[in-house]
Amino acid sequence: MNLTALLIALPLASSPLIYLASRARTSARAAERTSWWLSLGVLLILWGLWLRAALSLSTGETLSVTFGLLALRVDGLSLFFALVVLGVSTLVLVSSSAETTEGSEKYFAALLTTTGALIGMVCARDLFNLWVWLETVVISSFLLVALEQDRPLALDASIKYLTQSAVGSILIVLGIALVLAQTGSLTLDSAQSGRLAPGLLAAGVLLIVGLGIKSALVPLHTWLPDVYANAPTRVTALLSGAVTVSGLIILMRALLPLVSAAETWGLLLIGAGVVNTLIGNLLAFRQTDVKRLLAYSSISHIGTILLGFGVSLYANLPQAAQAGLFHLFTLGLMETLAFLCLATLPNNRHITLADLRGLIYRAPLVGVGLLLALLSLAGLPPLAGFMSKWQVFAAAFISPDPIVRGAVVVIALNILLALGYYLPPLLTLFAGEQPPSKRQEKRSPLTVRLPLILLSALIVLVGVLPDSVRWLTELASAVLVFGGVP
């Protein structure tokens, strides 16, 4: 089978088979272990396919497949985001092995479906199929958020997520319909030249607003804090590390046919980036729920990514798109590490600052991991979060435009503002006296510790050696700015 098709079809086809195979087992424990091992095997095969695709692209090979009206292609952007998705999904899956709950086979099946749909979404070559994949991601994510059916708050959050996503979907469909009516084509490669007609400008606005709901652009963000706070914590790691930011990737993809109005779209994204950063930081203050605090922090970091993407369109700076993708990558590392650390706590449903008290002594590995994640999110050197923010600001400052430089200054000053809400959890990690060793918490299994060690190491290494991922972000940014490379 075609390599591109395998990358997408394997997790989607395996998902129901794994669920059925697990349901055939007689005990809940056997079903959970069966679904975990089979899901891990699928993800390991996907890693092998990803490596094969990376080698093929490096030699100039075109990776594409067409099934009737469905056209898919692996390019630099697909390869980059597939790496993010596979990385987050694998680490979340490995970490989940220690938590046996009834219905785990549903969780693992939905996780694989989300993984396959995310990869399919970023490989789509036309607006309609891009929307279909996006809705598949929303539905599978909804199932993950609503997994704990005994929690009314989780069900409420999942319904809120689905309802607001449905509104975004309607706007996206209207935007797609306008593009089809005006141009007669929905392919992402058919960029319109010259000044856009009013109908296409309206289509672009509808796409930005619709996808903005799914990407938590302020003031369309209200679903995100509730979902992050009330979803199972490992599900939140997947949402924050891959699902939410996928909307930003798709937003840039969807604007490719309307690229002749790049300056207009860029200006809108820059403005949205400033608003996201400021509002996200302000709302994070006075939060005592740690997951909700990280949700507002994520909204703020989305603003930094928007700045990079917006400047790349507004000022025609490929470096800014590359820097924005780099920050998207590091945000996935930081958020995934933070939520996986929180998932190890005994009471990981509703986590307050009091639950972090003395964590650095009670569970040193978890405490150090959360410490690195928070310091990196705060933008302190030499960690990955500092380096990616610095690259966004440096790339944007190449432009002499006062609007761009003003936006950079505002967002940079917000880093200082953010320290005000990162400081309490950081200090709480060290609060209290060191307990005797006999009172330290039980050591976590290796499958829980390994993802924390790997993510902690990556946050340090990527901060010290940012060029280690530059080849991939440059390939991806070429697609965003110039419309794509095979």
Image (cartoon, helix red, strand yellow):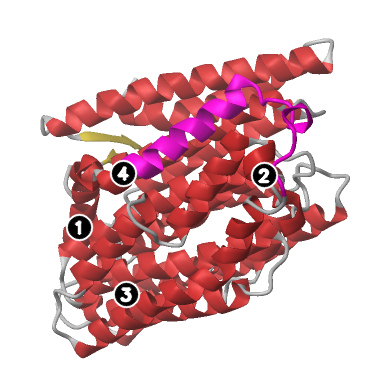
Disc 1 marks which amino acid? Gly
| Residue 198 among magenta residues | no
| Residue 448 among magenta residues | yes
Q: Nearer the viewer, mark 4 or mark 3?
A: 4
Q: Nearer the viewer, mark 4 or mark 1?
A: 4
Tell me which segment is drawn in magenta.
433-461
Q: Nearer the viewer, mark 1 or mark 2?
A: 2
Disc nearer the start of the sequence (3/1): 3
Disc nearer the start of the sequence (4/1): 4
The answer to whether residue 368 is above or below residue 248 is above
Residue 19, image quadrant: top right
Residue 187, image quadrant: bottom left
Disc 3 marks which amino acid? Gln
Disc 4 marks which amino acid? Val
Judging by the rendered image, the residue that carries numbered circle 2 is 359
Tag 2 and tag 4, C-beta contact below 8 Å: no
For label 3, the SS is helix
Judging by the rendered image, the residue that carries numbered circle 3 is 182
- Identify the disc placed on residue 462: 4
Disc nearer the start of the sequence (2/4): 2
Disc nearer the start of the sequence (1/2): 2
Disc nearer the start of the sequence (3/2): 3
